[in-house]
Image (spheres, rainbow, N blue to C red):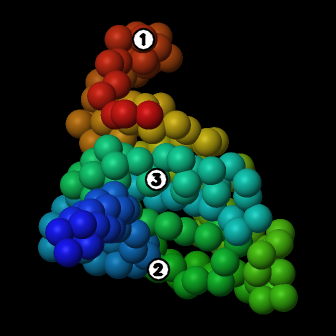
Amino acid sequence: MKKITLGLIAVFVLSFTAIAQEINWITMDEALELQKKEPKKIFMDVYTNWCGPCKMLDKNTFQNADVAAYVNKHYYAVKFNAEGNEEVTYKDNTFRNPNYDATKANRRNSAHEFSRYLQVRAYPTMVFFDEEGGVISPVQGYLKPQQLELYLKIFQSDKYKEMTTQEQFNEYYKSFEPTFKE
C-alpha cells in the first residue's frame, strides 16, 4: 500500500512539474489588452506548422523550466502562426490572411498580413515588443535555452537601449553569463 501511495505521489509531483514548466501562451489581441491593465513586454513566437526548427524550439527550448519560468514572469507570451488564419488587431489596423487555404493547414500556406507587417521572413522568428506594444526587435532562428536567455534578459532589462553599436552588443554578448540550464 505504501508503494502505491508513494507511486501516486511521484506521478502527481512529476505531472505538476511538467505543467509548471509550460509557457502560458496567449493571442496577440489578449496580450495587448493585458498590457493596458498591467504593462509588460511581449515575447512572440512566430512559427509555421511545417517548420522543423519551430518544432525543435517548442520541444527543446520552450519546454525548458528556466525559459518557461522567466517568460511567464516577465513577458506576455504570444504564439503566432505566420501562415494561419487568426485575425489580429494591432495599432488600429486589422490583419488577416485573405489567401489562407484550410486544405494546406499543415503545409506551406499564404503568409499572414501581420507576419508581413512585422517583416518576418524566416521561421522561427521571435519578436519582442515593449510595454506599449511597439516592436523592439525580431530574433530569427532556432535558439537553445541559454542562447534565448541572452535576448530575454537584454530586452526585459532594457539594456538594449544602452547599445548603439554592434561593438557594444558584441561586448555584452561576450561578457554574458547564462544561468539557464540546457
Residue indicated by mark 2 = 89
For the residues labelled 2 and 1, say whether their Cβ atoms are less than 8 Å apart: no
Q: Is residue 101 above or below residue 156?
A: below
Q: x and y percent of residue 99 in the render?
A: 79, 83
Residue indicated by mark 1 = 174
Picture residue at 84% right of the left edge, 88% below the top: 103
Q: Residue furthest bottom?
A: 102
Could one spot residue 12 in this view of the protein?
no
Instruction: Answer with mark 2 or mark 3, whichever residue precedes in sequence.
Output: 3
* Numbered disc 2: secondary structure: strand
Q: x and y percent of residue 65 in the render?
A: 34, 49
**Amino acid found under the numbered disc labelled 2:** Thr
Q: Does residue 131 appear left or right of residue 89 in this picture?
A: left
Q: x and y percent of residue 5 in the render?
A: 20, 72
**Amino acid found under the numbered disc labelled 1:** Lys
Q: x and y percent of residue 98 in the render?
A: 74, 85
* Numbered disc 3: secondary structure: loop
Dividing the picture into quarters, in which one does residue 154 lie?
A: top left
Q: CA distance from mark 2 to mark 1?
A: 38 Å
Quadrant in the picture for the N terminus: bottom left
Foreground residue among 12 and 20? 12
Picture residue at 35% right of the left edge, 18% below the top: 176
**Amino acid found under the numbered disc labelled 3:** Phe
Picture residue at 83% right of the left edge, 69% below the top: 108
Q: Residue furthest front?
A: 1
